[in-house]
Image (cartoon, grey):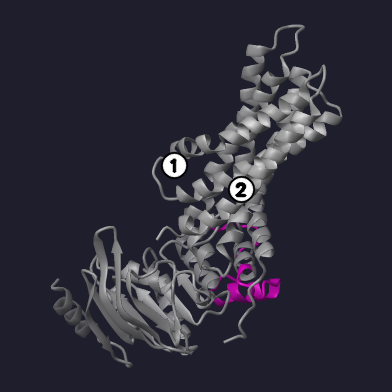
Amino acid sequence: MNALVLRAVGKTYGGRRALRDVSARFEPGRVAAVLGPNGAGKTTLLGILSTLLSPSSGAVHWGDQPLARGSDLRSRIGYVGHDPGLYGDLTARENLRFFCALHGSDATAGRVDRLLARVGLGDVPTDAVARTFSRGMQQRLALARALAHDPALLLFDEPSAALDPAGAAWLQAELAAERAAGRTVVLVTHDLEATAAIADQVVILRRGRVVADETRPGGFAAEALRGLYRDATGG
Amino acid sequence: MAERATSPGFLRQALRIAAKDLRIEWRSREVVMTMTFLAVVVVLIFSFAFVVEGARPPAPVVAGILWVAVVVSGTVALARVFDREREGEAIRSLLLAPAPRGSIYVGKVAATACLMLVTEAVLTALCVLLFAARADAMLARVVLLLALGTIGFAAVGCVFSAALLRARGRDALLATLLYPIIVPILIAGARGTAHLLDMAAPDLEAANFWTQFLFALDILFVIAGLWAFEPVVSGD
């Protein structure tokens, strides 16, 4: 698997610059957290990495291939947002069958059941539609949906928002498992505690610019990360 | 990691997306019931206004009522066709899948057209019943006109519906943007239907002209829709 490399990426909406000269490198087998205050450009960055947005300047490469909007490489990307990205009127199995089939991956009942079991939803009633699930169950199903096509890059946007402590702990274990599986994991979050517990790399954005980019394969101490964040953002 | 999956074909993806929408609708029947209810109300209101005891309304009036009901009920379908993608941000998952944007568009058009055709079956039966319209061989030609009009309507409407996915007041905006564009469909459908429903002497030549005109409009609108859908739905 290859590294994801951003070179001087900028994004402008109308006259407003959401990202300016953002350069970073995300390696496989690592969890990278993108931090920053509201409006720093984190979600825009994730939009560009997911190929749903195109940069106004600069370039993103995944290995030797450019990662542009609508690129075929999107079939190797899994995305979990703070909204689950599911159809509330379909059951868990119907949702997974649909997305597996759309990605051209195995959509058989056995595979779908294995995906559900992997995210702890193996015993979910077959006739329960997704909108009746708790927030935590929806987030688990969203992860199963994102993993349905066995992506090499996993993007998370505020994945632990609205999760209870047990759900957040489950998510951390999942992120660690994805890292161990050799995937590149990039998550956008405000949660410094969770970041310290799981991230190997921290990229801090402020007003669209990278103000800190540190990699510590052993992880970050919570206090050190808080200090880094405070120094970088001034808050 | 598993071996990379192969991307399924355009039409298969479109069918999957249409089947998903129809499955959701089959479960709730929410859109088709609302469409049919509105269409029946429109026809009933016009029937009170135009049906005088013992006198059959003229064919152009019946044709006009039928097509107005089609447009009103079809607008309900279009207003909802992308709502289910917006709820829970399912549209993001859909756009990240390796399905060509065109196949998403074709799937949405197909699903919308299916819902409209169900309502139109009820509408046509109601018009035959209330207005003593022709229920003979001409009816098959009317059905063809309705099907062609429905495809054109859905082809234009799905582009606008996608464009207004995140707009406030999108229901009002949808009708405002859509109706001027679909005027040619409405004219062709109503004129063609009127020629076919004429009890004295159906004008087949004129009806054929309007049928071909609708067919040409469908081709134009579907091509334009395929071209416009990608930038519209990406919304970058």
In the image: residue B132, left or right of residue A39: right
Give how far across and how far down residue A122 sits, in percent.
60, 71
Q: Judge whether residue A123 is colored magenta.
A: yes
Boundaries of the magenta span: A102-130
> How far separated are the C-alphas under marks 2 and 1?
25 Å
Q: Nearer the viewer, residue A92 or B51?
A: B51
The numbered dot on residue B170 is 1
Chain label for disc 1: B
Looking at the picture, does residue A80 appear above or below residue A66? above
Looking at the picture, does residue B167 appear above or below residue B76? below
Q: Nearer the viewer, residue B219 or A64?
A: B219
Q: Nearer the viewer, residue B214 or B114?
A: B214
Give how far across and how far down residue B37 sits, in percent.
63, 30
| Whether residue B73 is visible | no
Chain label for disc 2: B
| Whether residue A133 is visible | yes
The numbered dot on residue B220 is 2
Is disc 2 placed on a helix, strand or loop?
helix
